[in-house]
């Protein structure tokens, strides 16, 4: 929706440089091309670039001040239940001068306070609240981490921003070698606490961070993913019949889609041809005439354009499509890295997402509905159905090892004990992000007193780190084209229902399922039953495929790309050491090196995108798809 930035000088007297504030606005301009707001005073500077979706008038531009001039809000996101909160505030005598959710958020914070209001908000948000009287700054991020917020602080200043690149005019950024090593070792990228930039932190989802003049900052969690677990709700849904469960889920999804269509500017939808986005489009098209739909056609034998066209024909909607070819994975890589702000080998489908986002914006649409979150809520990933079997296998192997170790003298010689130093070091580099996710969920289950199998709360695990990486991709590359992504499956009532549904409503035996990934098991069973009411069976029962992206798997990278480059400098590699690294690296690792090199060139060597495009095009090749 927007780009936000703030700087607070700890001396309380320094006035931020106006030219630098406007340069910061330029760096965030793609996030909010409709207006630029700047505020500067002693000790404080605020910048807001606006993508206007609700109340398009200038009266809703930001930074937004309360009527007394004490509080200023810079806010990025959408509050979908803002109308209900506004009605309550009006009953309490609060007057409004706009029809925006921004004013509702600010007045709600002033009237109710953080702790009372934040748990009630349904939507996505990251904001900074400045209290000019107390000279305090409060930073907040939604519980899923849909909207980004990073910050840097030292003894002189505190800076926060939607994107780390906006901090560059104020702070000399440096790479974090440990995060770079974690990425090369297979990590998908940090989504909280630690960024790829030294001393730049990522505010954790569901967190409040308060900084008062002359005091140490304080952080606390106001909501976590584990809070969706409710043992009473789980028991109630377990006792419910299938038809009633399907009916109620349909009602929740319809209500969510309706909320996510709220806007005073055009809203469209992404059309992949898969179940999740198809159901969202079908529901949206019933109340939203002439819904604009968009498709990224990754050209090749796995193209999903036929399924997307079938859906468009069924819904009688015009679909706009952009072709994504192998050369795009080279030529669009620098732009994707610049907006992603860290190497992204974990999601190579970022390139098609960037291309289709640009198509959306060129078509005059500012926001799009996405099917993200359905696979996490309803267990749609192909590896999930056999997770119980894999866990039993690992437990059996562990038990067998313990038995062998009991053999006197020879036990540990026959089967040496595993030494976990390597995994611990990797965990330290990653800040144990995924491990702590799991521990937090298990702690929530214990506190609830639930006596359930891990399969019953498996959705909670997928709604953590994995989902956050996808949401970062969608936000970074959608906003690169000034397009906001919205996620109806992450509406709080929908997630609460999905998390507490019994496992049998998500994965169910079916003799007609011939998917080689999990034969005779139907994934997302209840969601498919809802979709049967809106879609042809060929779409509602279609197996998950995801973006058919394999260009990077077919890519070769020439050693010349890395000579006297960023990676060599970061690790202080001599020429012989660099030659050894590249000769010992396989194609997949060289692609990771390419991603890291490109990121470093853009952010720390000030190489411009066109120059990096030329370098990548000159030193990479993508093999044709084998017939």
Image: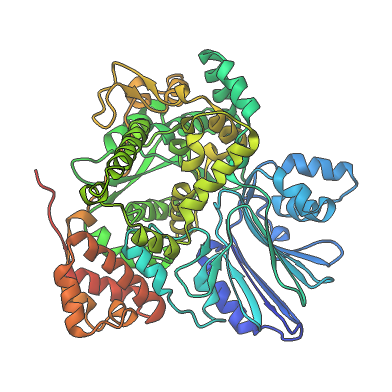
Q: Could you say which is closer to the camera, residue 505 or residue 132?
A: 505
Q: Is residue 617 left or right of residue 612?
A: left
Q: Is residue 444 left or right of residue 386?
A: right
Residue 76 in view here: no
Q: Quadrant of residue 245?
A: top right
- The C terminus appears in which quarter of the rendering? top left
Q: Residue at x 26, y 82 (%)?
A: 573
Q: Is residue 252 left or right of residue 418?
A: right
Q: Is residue 513 left or right of residue 98?
A: left
Residue 257 position within the rendered picture, expressed as x and y whole percent measured from the top left:
56, 34
Residue 293 in view here: yes
Q: Quadrant of residue 561?
A: bottom left
Vertical comparison of 22 with 326: above or below: below
Q: Residue at x 59, y 77 (%)?
A: 22
- The N terminus appears in which quarter of the rendering? bottom right
Residue sitting at the far left: 627
Q: Residue at x 65, y 80 (%)?
A: 157
Residue 331 position within the rendered picture, expressed as x and y whole percent measured from the top left:
27, 64
Residue 129 position within the rendered picture, expressed as x and y whole percent measured from the top left:
72, 63
Q: How is the image coloured?
A: rainbow
Q: Quadrant of residue 179?
A: bottom left
Residue sitting at the far front: 408
Vertical comparison of 110 with 459: above or below: below
Q: How many marks?
A: 0
């Amino acid at each position: 929706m927007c780009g936000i930035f703030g700087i607070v000088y700890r001396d309380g007297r320094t006035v931020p440089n106006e030219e630098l504030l406007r340069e910061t606005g330029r760096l965030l301009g793609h996030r909010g091309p409709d207006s630029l707001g700047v505020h500067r005073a002693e000790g404080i500077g605020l910048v807001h670039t606006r993508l206007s979706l609700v109340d398009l008038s200038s009266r809703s531009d930001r930074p937004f001040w309360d009527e007394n001039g004490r509080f200023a809000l810079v806010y990025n996101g959408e509050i979908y239940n803002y109308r209900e909160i506004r009605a309550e505030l009006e009953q309490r005598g609060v007057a409004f001068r706009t029809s925006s959710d921004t004013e509702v958020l600010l007045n709600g914070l002033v009237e109710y306070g953080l702790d009372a209001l934040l748990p009630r908000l349904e939507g996505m948000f990251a904001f900074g609240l400045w209290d000019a009287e107390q000279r305090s700054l409060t930073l907040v991020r939604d519980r899923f981490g849909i909207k980004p917020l990073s910050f840097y602080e030292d003894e002189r200043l505190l800076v926060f921003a939607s994107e780390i690149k906006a901090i560059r005019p104020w702070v000399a950024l440096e790479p974090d070698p440990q995060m770079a090593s974690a990425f090369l070792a297979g990590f998908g990228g940090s989504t909280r606490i630690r960024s790829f930039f030294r001393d730049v932190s990522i505010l954790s989802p569901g967190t409040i961070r308060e900084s008062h003049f002359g005091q140490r900052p304080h952080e606390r969690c106001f909501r976590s993913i584990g809070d969706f677990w409710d043992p009473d709700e789980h028991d109630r849904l377990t006792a419910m019949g299938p038809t009633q469960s399907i009916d109620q889920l349909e009602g929740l999804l319809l209500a969510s889609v309706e909320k996510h269509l709220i806007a005073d500017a055009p809203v469209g939808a992404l059309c992949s041809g898969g179940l999740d986005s198809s159901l969202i489009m079908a529901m949206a098209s019933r109340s939203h005439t002439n819904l604009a739909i968009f498709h990224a056609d990754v050209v090749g034998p796995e193209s999903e354009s036929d399924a997307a066209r079938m859906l468009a024909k069924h819904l009688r909607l015009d679909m706009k499509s952009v072709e994504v070819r192998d050369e795009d994975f080279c030529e669009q890589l620098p732009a994707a890295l610049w907006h992603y702000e860290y190497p992204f080998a974990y999601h190579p489908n970022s390139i098609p997402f960037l291309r289709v986002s640009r198509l959306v914006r060129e078509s005059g649409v500012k926001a799009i509905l996405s099917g993200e979150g359905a696979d996490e809520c309803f267990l749609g990933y192909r590896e999930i159905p056999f997770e119980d079997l894999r866990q039993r296998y690992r437990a059996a192997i562990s038990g067998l090892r313990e038995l062998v170790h009991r053999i006197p003298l020879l036990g540990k010689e026959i089967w040496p004990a595993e030494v976990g130093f390597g995994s611990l070091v990797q965990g330290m580099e990653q800040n144990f992000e995924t491990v702590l996710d799991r521990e937090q969920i298990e702690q929530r289950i214990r506190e609830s007193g639930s006596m359930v199998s891990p399969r019953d709360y498996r959705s909670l695990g997928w709604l953590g780190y994995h989902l956050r990486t996808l949401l970062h991709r969608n936000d970074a590359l959608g906003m690169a084209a000034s397009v906001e992504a919205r996620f109806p499956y992450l509406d709080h009532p929908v997630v609460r229902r999905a998390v507490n549904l019994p496992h049998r409503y998500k994965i169910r035996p079916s003799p007609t399922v011939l998917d080689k990934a999990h034969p005779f098991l139907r994934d997302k069973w209840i969601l498919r039953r809802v979709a049967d009411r809106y879609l042809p069976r060929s779409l509602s029962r279609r197996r998950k495929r995801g973006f058919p992206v394999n260009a990077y798997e077919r890519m070769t990278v020439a050693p010349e790309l890395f000579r006297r480059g960023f990676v060599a400098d970061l690790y202080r590699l001599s020429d012989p050491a660099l030659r050894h690294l590249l000769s010992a690296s396989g194609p997949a690792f060289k692609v990771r090196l390419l991603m890291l090199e490109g990121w470093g060139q853009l952010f720390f060597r000030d190489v411009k995108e066109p120059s990096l495009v030329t370098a990548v095009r000159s030193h990479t090749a993508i093999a044709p798809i084998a017939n």
